[in-house]
Each structure stands twice: as C-alpha cells, then as structure tokens.
Image: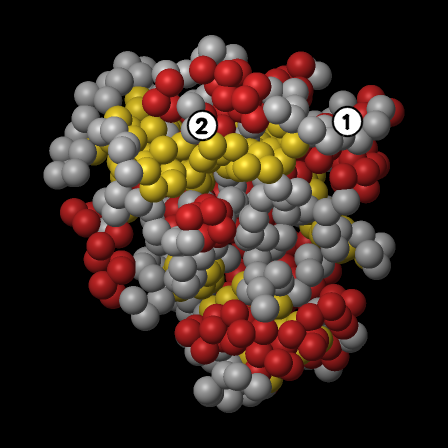
C-alpha cells in the first residue's frame, strides 16, 4: 500500500518538477527545490524513526514559522505520526496542558520558546522523550538529517489516519484537540484549487500567519505545496516586510487574518510596492471589518472573504470577488466539496431569510476531538458538524453570519447580534477597533456594551451611541460604552469575548445561558 498521506505530496511533486522552488526561508535566505525538500523530508523521517517515533505518536511543535517547521510536519506525516502545533503565545502552564492532553512524546522548539518549553516540560505528567531545536534555536533538524539517506520506505499511511491535532483557540475555555486526517488536508487543498481563480503550480504565497494556526496551513502553505507552487516563509509578521516580500517574491495568492490586512492599510505609501503579481487575496480567521475590505477592493484587488473553522480543515464557505460589493457582509457559499445547511434548534432547515445555526458535512470535517468522545458526539449530531455560528441565507444560497450562537444578546426578548453592531461602529472615524457584549440589566435582561479602542485621543460615547441609532434599531444600540487601549485577542486574531465579559460584568458567561 502506498503512503496516502500528505507526506507523499512532496515525493510526487519532486518526481514531476524537481527543480521548482518549493520553500524560501526568509531568515536564512535558503531556497529549496522540490528535489531538495524531498531529500530533507525523507532524511528527517528516517531520523525521527531512529529516535523511536512510530505511527500514531505525537510530535509537538512550539516554534516560529520557518522552512524547518514545514519539513518536520511532512517528515512526521510520512511516518504516520501526528503533528501537534502549539500556539507560541501560550504560557508555560497552557503549553503543558497541550503536551499532557495530546500525550506528545517529542517537542520541537525554536529559540524564543526554550524557557517556556523547559517550564512546561517540568509540569507534564508523562515523559516527553525527545526535544529538538529547530529554526533559530540551532542545528537540531540538520543534525537529525545528517547521516540519513532517506532510503527507509515510508509507512503505509491511510487517508483516514490522523495527521494533525490542532488545538482550538480556547475562546470560551480549555482548548480541545481537533483531529484532522490526511484526507481532510487533501480535500481542503482540492477545495482551494477549485475555488474562484484557484491555486495552481505557478502560485507563490507568503506564509505570514503563524503555522500553528490552521489558516496558515490550510489556506496558504499546504494547498500551494500540494499544487506545486512556492511558499515563502518569514519568521513572523511585520507589515512593511510583508509588503516588501510580496513585491520581491512576486506573490500571487495571499491569506491573512483581518488584523494583518488592517495593519497593511496603515503602511505609508503602499503604492511604492509592486504587487501587480497578486491574483487574489483571502481574509479569514475572523470577520473582516468592511472598511478593510473596501480599502483593498478600492485598489482594484481581487479580495475575497471566507468562513472556516479548525474543525473544517478549515475552508467551508467563500465569497468570490465579483460578489464582494453585491453581497457585502456575506461569507459566500460552500466550497466545492462542502455541504452546508442552516437549521433551527431541532435541526430542521430554516427558510431563506431566517436565522439558523450553520451545520456542515463533507470530507474536510474533522475526525473528532482528541480524547473527548462526548464533545465529539455533541458537535457531530446527526452526522453534521454544528458550528455554533448563526447565519441567514438569501435565495441564492449566500450566507451572512449574524454571530456566534453563544455571543448572541437577548435584550427585552429581542435578539441582538454583536457583529451587526460592531460593523456599524467600525464605520465611525473615531473607532479603531470595537467589540460588543451583553451585560446584565434588571429591566431588559441584557443590554448592549461596546468596548472601543479609539482612533483619536478622545471620542464622545454619546456621539457613538447616536451614530449607531441612525443606523440600527434602538434596542441594538449600546447603552454603555467603555474605552480601552487594546481588545483581548488570541494569537490568531480572534476576540476573547469571555475576557471582556469577565472584565466588565465579573462573569465569563453570557447572561441568558
């Protein structure tokens, strides 16, 4: 049986186009062809096997982006072992939880996280047998590769074997390990190849979002490598460096989270960067503020927005560029190999124009939560993944998300969707960022609180409320406005609304739950 996993992708690409550039490591300047990448992946897999890593074992990565990060991912996959990307912004206790929960027996670490790794390892109840320095931390992967010819036959990996355990953001509590299979990754890549202008072997992308984020892997690095294109890997995100690299490397397709796209709009004289090679840009990971979308479409860019989740590998829906204006605020329609429905509390389809929970099915839907069968069963009721997102579809099937089910505010019996209020307030020139949550109210049950990052030194809260009232029903408008220097976000840019609820109400829970 052939290796049916993602570890075989590089072998096949090396056979077809050995001289094509696969990876560019910005920090070291190293450029690898597919032939060179194949050699390093095969030799690294042999080295990992020599350490005792076997099929099904978990290998955790606590590291900045680098070519070695992707090399180790493919080498681990070739053995049938499982990669566990770890959020680099976690505290030592949180890293220890991921290592403990996943049962990782090996940990790869880059330079900036050695102290965190040591502190985390001291808290883990089982023995993490191997630590490996990668990226800027030393020559660990090179040492693993040296002396290995990569001649060991790859394991017979099945498509339904787990490839990655990707821990969810933990915006509401302890993160859960979403098990993504090799087939999940394959079909996600196929979806990206068939969507809109698609991804092809002539494409180049900048892997600027952190690789521990499913968006960076599933919407950037893996589909481009599957197609035979080139992935440019900087260590992290700097807006001006990103634009310079996009120009120098002639980037053709680009994924970023909203906070990154927003940061690019602040770079002075963006026109000095030659971005004429860019075919399309994709925003995901969180709702993209309309002013950011309008900024890039105003430049004539093919700018698309989409919806995805870790549990969906992540691509689920996308809005093609030709519909960005006519269907503003929508996340579009399902990718080719995704089925989507909007359902009521009894899992019955709702009519166009009615709000329902978005549920999805298809070959990109995860295999479940690691070690959590009850949570898996709850999420996969009736064979459909229940996203927890509320949306409304028009007659043509375009879906507009109205909010997370858990974040919905009920004020005097009326449903208030924070995203709708946030989108209005984002348009005020005095607002740099904003989040809306419900707060307890004796009369109404809940009322609307807006937490605002001001764009200027002072913004009149009454002016913001009046601005909202000109565009929204009064029950949707903020009864209270608070100001802050920055909103709490996780490493993928998602708002931590539970932190806001704790800060301003003393409880992380929504009032009506």
Checking the image for residue 305, the label placed there is none
279 versus 338 height, above or below: above
**Residue 233, placed above or below residue 359:** below
Q: In this rendering, does residue 145 appear at all? A: no
Residue 11 % position (x, y): 59, 58
Q: Position of residue 513 (x, y in %)?
A: 25, 47
Q: Position of residue 422 (x, y in %)?
A: 49, 28
Residue 28 visible: yes
Q: Residue at x 27, y 59 (%)?
A: 376
Secondary-structure class at tag 1? loop
Q: Nearer the viewer, mark 1 or mark 2?
A: 2
Location of residue 32 (image quadrant): bottom right
Q: Position of residue 123 (x, y in %)?
A: 53, 84
Residue that carries the numbered disc 2 in the rendered image = 478
Decide which of 234, 201 is in the foreground and name it.
234
Determine whether, in the image, residue 211 is placed left or right of residue 36.
Answer: left
Q: Mark 2 and mark 1 in contact (Cβ < 8 Å)? A: no
Left or right, 142 with reference to 44: right
Q: Residue at x 64, y 81 (%)?
A: 118
The residue that disc 1 covers is 275
Count of marks overlaid on the render: 2
Q: Check disc 1: other Cα within 10 Å, few if <14, some if 14-19, many if 20+.
A: many
Tag 2: Cα neighbours inside 10 Å, few (<14), some, or many (≥20)? Answer: many
Name the quadrant of the N terminus: bottom left
User: Which tag, 1 or 2, sits closer to the chain's start?
Assistant: 1
């Amino acid at each position: 049986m052939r290796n049916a996993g993602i570890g075989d992708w590089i072998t096949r690409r090396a056979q077809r186009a050995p001289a094509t550039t696969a990876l560019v490591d910005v920090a070291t300047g190293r450029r690898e062809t597919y032939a060179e990448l194949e050699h390093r992946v095969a030799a690294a897999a042999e080295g990992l096997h020599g350490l005792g890593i076997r099929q099904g074992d978990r290998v955790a990565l606590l590291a900045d982006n680098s070519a070695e990060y992707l090399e180790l991912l493919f080498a681990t996959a070739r053995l049938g072992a499982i990669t566990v990307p770890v959020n680099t912004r976690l505290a030592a206790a949180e890293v220890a939880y991921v290592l403990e929960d996943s049962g990782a027996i090996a940990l790869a670490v880059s330079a900036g996280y050695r102290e965190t790794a040591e502190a985390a390892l001291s808290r883990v109840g089982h023995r993490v047998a191997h630590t490996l320095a990668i990226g800027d931390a030393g020559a660990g992967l090179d040492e693993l590769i040296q002396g290995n010819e990569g001649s060991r036959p790859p394991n017979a990996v099945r498509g339904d074997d787990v490839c990655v355990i990707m821990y969810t953001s933990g915006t509401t509590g302890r993160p859960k390990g979403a098990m993504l299979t090799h087939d999940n990754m394959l079909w996600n890549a196929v979806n990206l190849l068939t969507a809109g202008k698609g991804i092809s072997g002539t494409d180049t992308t900048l892997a600027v979002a952190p690789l521990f984020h499913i968006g960076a892997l599933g919407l950037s690095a893996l589909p481009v490598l599957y197609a035979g294109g080139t992935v440019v890997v900087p260590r992290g995100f700097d807006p001006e460096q990103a634009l310079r690299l996009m120009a120098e490397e002639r980037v053709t397709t680009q994924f970023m989270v909203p906070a990154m796209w927003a940061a690019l709009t602040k770079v002075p004289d963006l026109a000095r960067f030659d971005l004429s090679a860019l075919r399309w840009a994709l925003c995901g990971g969180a709702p993209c503020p309309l002013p950011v979308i309008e900024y890039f479409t105003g430049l004539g860019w093919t700018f698309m927005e989409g919806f995805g989740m870790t549990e969906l590998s992540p691509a689920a829906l996308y809005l093609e560029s030709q519909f960005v204006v006519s269907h503003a605020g929508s996340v579009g329609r399902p990718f080719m190999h995704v089925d989507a429905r909007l359902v009521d509390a009894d899992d019955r389809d709702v009519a166009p124009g009615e709000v329902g929970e978005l549920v999805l099915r298809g070959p990109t839907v995860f295999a479940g939560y690691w070690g959590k069968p009850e949570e898996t069963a709850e999420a996969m009721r009736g064979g459909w993944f229940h996203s927890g997102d509320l949306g409304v579809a028009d007659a043509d099937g375009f879906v507009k998300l109205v909010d997370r089910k858990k974040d919905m505010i009920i004020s005097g019996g009326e449903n208030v969707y924070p995203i709708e209020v946030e989108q209005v307030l984002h348009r005020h020139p005095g607002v740099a960022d904003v989040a809306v949550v419900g707060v307890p109210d004796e009369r109404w049950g809940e009322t609307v609180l807006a937490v605002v990052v001001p764009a200027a030194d002072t913004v009149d809260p009454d002016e913001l409320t009046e601005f909202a009232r000109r565009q929204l029903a009064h029950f949707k408008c903020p009864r209270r406005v608070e100001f802050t220097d920055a909103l709490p976000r996780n490493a993928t840019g998602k708002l931590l609304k539970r932190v806001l609820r704790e800060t301003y109400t003393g409880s992380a829970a929504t009032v009506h739950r």
